[in-house]
Image (cartoon, rainbow, N blue to C red):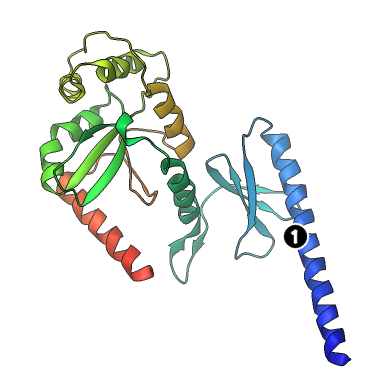
């Protein structure tokens, strides 16, 4: 009988704790929605820190106290393992977002058998984007495939946006992209294109500048990285991933 009572008490405690957690989630979600009424999605989960909840608002990650009184922006790092818990959470979100990307809607510059495939958000008029493209042969020689996604920083309808549309609609997209990166204005053209869709995806992924490089596992590498350094960085990331599996 004592054993049965222990089981019942344990079950009741578990139900009680879960109910409290759900109440906290509800309170926090209500507070977040009052601050971001247009948020398309809000997901709340526990963290290793007592009293702190992780809140995913669309593609962004923030934290909140369980009582819903305080919102915390920043990174959470485990000082024992040095794991960036915030970046891990963001990578998972990005991985889910890029999983359904249609690769036929990317302009690719790739070696025959690449070791790494990167999704690169680019702006036609971005200086460092042009520097990256000028070294495309070196990236490919280092086993890196570059699959371009458009991210006109000035926004939809801007001159850079129209250039991206014209490049996409060109008879030879690779040649048109290279010419545009060299500073030539592409011949104006219009057709069904994914430019606005790609720009919006970049925003959802947290892209704020270009070039922005994303690996298959959702890791975001912001800014220009020279070919050999990028290869070394990708090799290190792959080694860490292998040891943690």
The part of the image, by quadrant, that contains residue 242 is bottom left
Decide if residue 129 is on the left or right side of residue 79. left
**In this orientation, which residue lies closer to the viewer: 5 or 70?**
5
Residue 87 seen by the camera: yes
Give the image location of residue 19, x and y in percent: 80, 61
Q: What quarter of the picture does the C terminus occupy? A: bottom left
Figure quadrant of residue 175: top left
Q: How many marks?
A: 1
Residue 211 horizontal/vertical position (percent): 30, 35
* Label 1: few (<14), some (14–19) or many (≥20) C-alpha neighbours in 10 Å: some
Give the residue displayed 15% in from the left and 43% down from the top: 139
Q: Quadrant of the N terminus?
A: bottom right
Farthest residue toward the top? 188
At 28% from the left and 20% from the top, the residue drawn is 168
Q: Is residue 168 above or below residue 229?
A: above
| Residue 102 x, y percent position in the rendering | 36, 35
In the image, residue 130 lies at what x, y percent? 20, 28
Vertical arrangement, residue 26 with respect to residue 129, above or below: below
Residue at the image point whose x is 65% and y is 30% from the top: 38
- Left or right of 166, for residue 13: right
Residue bearing the label numbered 1? 21
Q: Secondary structure at mark 1?
A: helix
């Amino acid at each position: 009988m004592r054993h049965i009572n222990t089981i019942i008490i344990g079950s009741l405690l578990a139900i009680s704790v879960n109910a409290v957690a759900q109440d906290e989630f509800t309170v926090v979600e209500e507070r977040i929605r009052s601050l971001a009424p247009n948020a398309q999605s809000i997901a709340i989960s526990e963290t290793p820190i007592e009293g702190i909840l992780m809140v995913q608002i669309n593609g962004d990650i923030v934290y909140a106290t369980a009582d819903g009184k305080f919102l915390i922006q920043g990174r959470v790092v485990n000082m024992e393992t040095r794991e960036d818990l915030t970046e891990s959470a963001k990578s998972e979100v990005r991985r889910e977002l890029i999983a359904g990307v249609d690769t036929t809607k990317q302009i690719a510059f790739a070696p025959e058998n690449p070791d790494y495939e990167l999704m690169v958000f680019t702006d036609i008029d971005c200086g460092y984007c042009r520097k990256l493209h000028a070294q495309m042969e070196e990236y490919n020689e280092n086993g890196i495939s570059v699959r371009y996604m458009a991210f006109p920083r000035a926004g939809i309808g801007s001159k850079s946006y129209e250039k991206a549309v014209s490049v996409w609609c060109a008879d030879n997209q690779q040649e048109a992209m290279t010419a545009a990166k060299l500073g030539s204005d592409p011949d104006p053209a219009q057709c069904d294109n994914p430019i606005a869709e790609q720009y919006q995806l970049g925003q959802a992924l947290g892209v704020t500048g270009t070039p922005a490089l994303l690996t298959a596992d959702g890791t975001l590498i912001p800014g220009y990285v020279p070919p050999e350094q990028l290869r070394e960085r990708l090799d290190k990331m792959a080694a860490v991933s292998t040891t943690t599996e």
